[in-house]
Image (tube, rainbow, N blue to C red):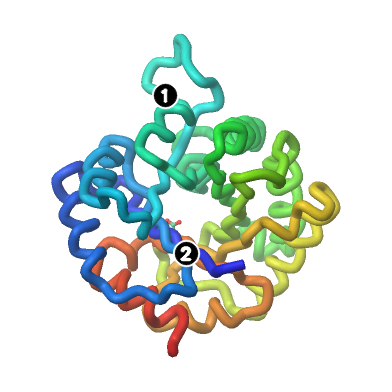
Amino acid sequence: MKKLLIANWKMHYGPIKAGAWIRAFRRERLPKELDIAVAVPFVSLAAARSSLGRASIPALAAQDVFWNEEGAFTGEISPGMLLEFGTEYCIVGHSERRQYLGETDEMVSKKAAAAQRSGISPVICVGETKIQRARGEASKTVRSQITAAVSQSKSEGKAPLVIAYEPLWAIGSGKSCSPQDTKEMHTIIRSVLEKKLGKAASAVRILYGGSVDVRNVAEYMTTTGVDGALIGGASLDPRNFGLLCRAALPA
Ligand code: PEP
């Protein structure tokens, strides 16, 4: 299984800047042994697709999705709509959405299942807060988030699940999780997936996210149980993200 790097622009770059980012990133030399995707705001999917043309690198990802295909759900975007842009991945349950928009485990699970049914790989984000880690509750928190999130999912078929372990205290803080703690959490996540999904768990990639940058990416990539990374701040500059992709798998 190739390692996967996903750029998460969050709420940055409308269509004009998105198109320019994709064109600049396409000029970067990228390791063939990596899968690379970029999660763009909904309104920038069309521009990103048009700058990509038929190219498939980077793959396109959305930052959210709704669980119904159509209907009276003002403001929401369905999996089918995302597919019209050739979207391959979709982040669900990012901690910023859980925190600021009240997304619950139940909503995350419905979104993940809907994406998967349509052939889009959901990138399910889980992670503990600083207080939960200090209280020794990191493992319990993440176990329960994963159990809920995959309760309606199947990991077989063309759109395998992706999990992103993102401790909240590490996101955008410059304080990344130590490789030892990351390894421990990824091992726990893998064991929950095996229990819930059986053999299909082997198709699931578990990414680390939280202050990954050019300097530390290689260390995460060689940490046992880490199948890639979700990258926020360090993905905003296309040349820096190209550098990060090369640093992830040094020749
Ligand atoms: C994220 O947005 O998911 C993230 C990990 O952000 P950062 O890399 O900036 O910590």
The x and y percentages for residue 230 are: 47, 61
Query: Where 156 falls versus 7 (above or below)?
Result: above
Q: Quadrant of residue 127?
A: bottom right
- Amino acid type, callout 2: Asp
The residue located at (47%, 46%) in the rendering is: 88
Q: Which mark is residue 35?
A: 2
- Amino acid type, callout 1: Glu
Q: Is residue 216 left or right of residue 207?
A: left
Query: Where 57 falls versus 27 (above or below)?
Result: above
Mark 1 is surrounded, within 10 Å at the Cα level, by few (under 14), some (14 to 19) or many (20 or more) other residues, namely: some
The residue located at (76%, 63%) in the rendering is: 188
Residue closer to the observer: 127 or 61: 61
Mark 2 is surrounded, within 10 Å at the Cα level, by few (under 14), some (14 to 19) or many (20 or more) other residues, namely: some
Q: Which mark is residue 76?
A: 1
Q: Quarter for ligand 1?
A: bottom left
The x and y percentages for residue 4 are: 51, 64
Query: Where 127 falls versus 154 (above or below)?
Result: below
**How far apart are the alpha carbons under marks 1 and 2?**
28 Å
